[in-house]
Amino acid sequence: MKNLIASIAIMFITVFTVQSQTCKAYIPYQEGTKLEITSYDKKGKITGIDKQELTKVSESGNTTSFVMHHSNCDKKGEELFNGDLKYKCKDNVFYVDMSGFVNSEQMEAYKDMDVKVTMDEIDIPADLSVGQKLKDGSVKMDISGNSPVNLSFVVNVENRKVEAKESVTTEAGTFDCVKISQDIITKSMMSFKISSVEWYAEGVGVVKTETYRKGKLMGSSKLTKLERP
């Protein structure tokens, strides 16, 4: 009888805790979920594939943390670079690892150097409305090595706005998405600005993207495979 009462008490505590920590995560919820994002150039030709797997989900207090392993491959599927990105849900807000805005080829070039990364994360609140403006974010990399000259560059993500709530269909299925636009400014020796539109689905992540420069399409990507455990 005591064990039954204890079990019921634990069940109510668990339910209360989950409800109090409700957060819409724009990433898979289950460890072992695998995705593939295929990238295309402006003419629709495949340029690469990003293979992803959710390797860890953990909870601490009011925060749920996620680790997504990425394997960036060329159009033939051969791996060029791999690494982990970290995301979290805290106080009904989903936070995105800004490291994902750094070009993977740049990261590979600096792998044998001392790299210090500082960032101000972008986020996606649980309650969204069309026209809503979202928080800006940034990531800065200070790089030092054998060269007497240290390098640094900054990526700012600005002017983020909820454009619409739409249904998007790809080879992986049909998803209810929130459409977010933004400007991405990279600053180093020179500045480079692009604009992008991203479609996020709760429990999945980015389903589709389009990238523009001076109003012209540069490339796109879409979710082409989704495997749940």
Image: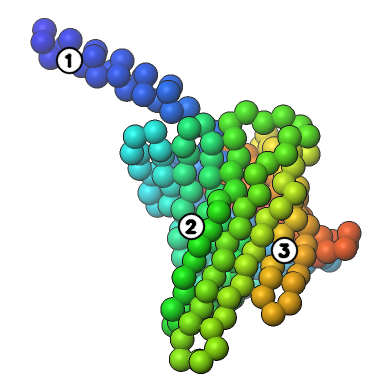
Residue drawn at x 59%, y 35% is 125
Q: Secondary structure at mark 3?
A: strand
Q: Are marks 2 and 1 in contact (CB under 8 Å)?
A: no
Query: Relative to residue 100, is residue 27 depicted above or below?
Result: above
Q: Secondary structure at mark 2?
A: strand
Q: Which residue is tagged 1?
A: 6
Amino acid carrying label 1: it is Ala
Q: Earlier in the sequence, mark 2 or mark 1?
A: 1
Mark 1: few/some/many CA within 10 Å (<14, 14-19, 20+): few
User: Three-letter amino acid code at disc 3?
Assistant: Ile
Q: Which numbered marker is on residue 167?
A: none
* Residue 214 position within the rendered picture, expressed as x and y whole percent measured from the top left: 88, 63
Residue at 38% across / 49% down in the picture? 56
Q: Residue furthest top?
A: 1
Any part of residue 44 in sight: no
- Placement of 76 over or under 95, stated as above or below: below
> Mark 3 highlights which residue?
185
The disc label shown at residue 85, or none = 2
What quarter of the picture does the C terminus occupy?
Answer: top left
Label total for image: 3
Position of the N terminus by quadrant: top left
- Up/down of 81 relative to 8, above or below: below
Q: Residues within 10 Å of mark 3 (few under 14, many from 20)?
A: some
* Mark 1–mark 3 distance (CA, rounded to whole Å): 55 Å
Residue found at x 44% / y 78%: 114
Among the two numbered marks 1 and 3 on one chain, the one whose residue lies closer to the N terminus: 1
